[in-house]
């Protein structure tokens, strides 16, 4: 994929010099300084010449240098456009990642979203469907937007709430095995409060379906 990068141009001034070939000289001193050979247009007896292949400039940019001497009495017209050249930069595939985006990193489970007006941000996205967790996954850390069925048929399961929640982050939980009464689900608050209480939540009634939403200061339980 190629991108064109161009500096702003307010004015473009054209300067020119005319020389006469003598069949021997290959270098002609200009009355202006050339920054880039691509900005110098050269014709010999009205025939446009190809830059680099037919002519170039010296290091100082003060001379036009031909690869072969123009013939005797040939009219050499050099026109210089004082404007910033267009530079083409090739961006390699897979070379742009999160480090190149001017967006702060999100948290686990969030996705990069757009507001439709060029603004990017990370936000919780409902992935659709439920994930499955059991005692083999315990303990695990929930993430914003997660919907999870938790099976405690064999043992209790510990779920940690996100450490740095954002307002409106929500998590949905289902008693996947119908055994919360025998083996409860322990919801560790992980630094936040739950219902304004600084205690972990123990869910010990079976076939439960509920959720937690962060209101900006505490986690609220909803059913």
Image: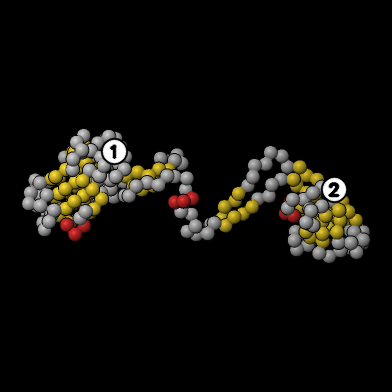
In this view of the protein, can residue 131 be seen by the observer? yes
**Residue position marked by numbered label 2 in the rendering:** 31
- Mark identifier at residue 221: none
Q: Mark 1 falls on what kind of element?
A: loop
> Looking at the figure, which quarter contains the C terminus?
top left
Mark 2 surroundings: few (<14), some (14-19) or many (≥20) residues within 10 A: few
Mark 1, Cα crowd under 10 Å, few <14 / some 14-19 / many 20+, is some
Up the image or down, 40 lies above or below 120; here it is below
Residue at the image point whose x is 84% and y is 51% from the top: 30
Find residue 88 and report its horizontal and vertical position in percent: 61, 54
Q: Are marks 2 and 1 in contact (CB under 8 Å)?
A: no
Q: Is residue 63 above or below residue 113?
A: below
Q: Can I make out residue 207 in this image?
A: no
Question: What percent of the width, then of the height, locates residue 115?
Answer: 40, 40
Closest to the observer, 34 or 49 = 34
Q: How many marks?
A: 2
Q: Which residue is mark 1?
A: 168
Q: CA distance from mark 2 to mark 1?
A: 68 Å
- The colour scheme applied to this rendered structure is secondary structure
Under circle 2, the secondary element is loop
Q: Position of residue 82 (x, y in %)?
A: 74, 45
Q: Is residue 23 above or below residue 183?
A: below
Residue in front for this viewpoint, 206 or 88 = 206
Q: Nearer the viewer, residue 101 or 130?
A: 101
* Residue at image location 86% in from the left, 61% down from the top: 26
Viewer-side label of 2, 1: 1
Residue 60 as seen in the image, left or right of residue 9: right
């Amino acid at each position: 994929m190629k991108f064109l990068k161009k500096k702003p141009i307010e004015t473009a001034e054209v300067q020119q010099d005319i020389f006469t070939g003598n069949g021997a000289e290959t270098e002609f001193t200009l009355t202006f300084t050339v920054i880039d050979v691509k900005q110098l247009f050269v014709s010999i007896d009205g025939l446009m010449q190809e830059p680099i292949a037919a002519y170039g400039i010296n290091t100082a940019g003060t001379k036009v240098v031909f690869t072969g001497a123009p013939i005797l009495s040939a009219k050499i017209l050099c026109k210089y456009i004082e404007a910033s050249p267009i530079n083409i930069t090739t961006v390699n595939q897979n070379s742009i990642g999160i480090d190149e985006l001017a967006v702060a990193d999100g948290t686990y489970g969030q996705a990069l979203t757009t507001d439709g007006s060029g603004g990017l941000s990370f936000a919780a996205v409902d992935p659709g469907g439920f994930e499955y967790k059991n005692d083999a996954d315990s303990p695990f850390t929930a993430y914003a937007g997660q919907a999870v069925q938790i099976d405690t048929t064999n043992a209790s399961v510990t779920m940690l709430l996100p450490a740095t929640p954002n307002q409106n982050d929500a998590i949905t939980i289902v008693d996947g095995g119908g055994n919360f009464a025998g083996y409860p689900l322990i919801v560790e608050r992980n630094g936040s409060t739950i219902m304004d209480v600084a205690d972990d939540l123990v869910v010990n009634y079976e076939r439960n379906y509920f959720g937690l939403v962060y209101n900006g200061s505490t986690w609220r339980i909803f059913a």
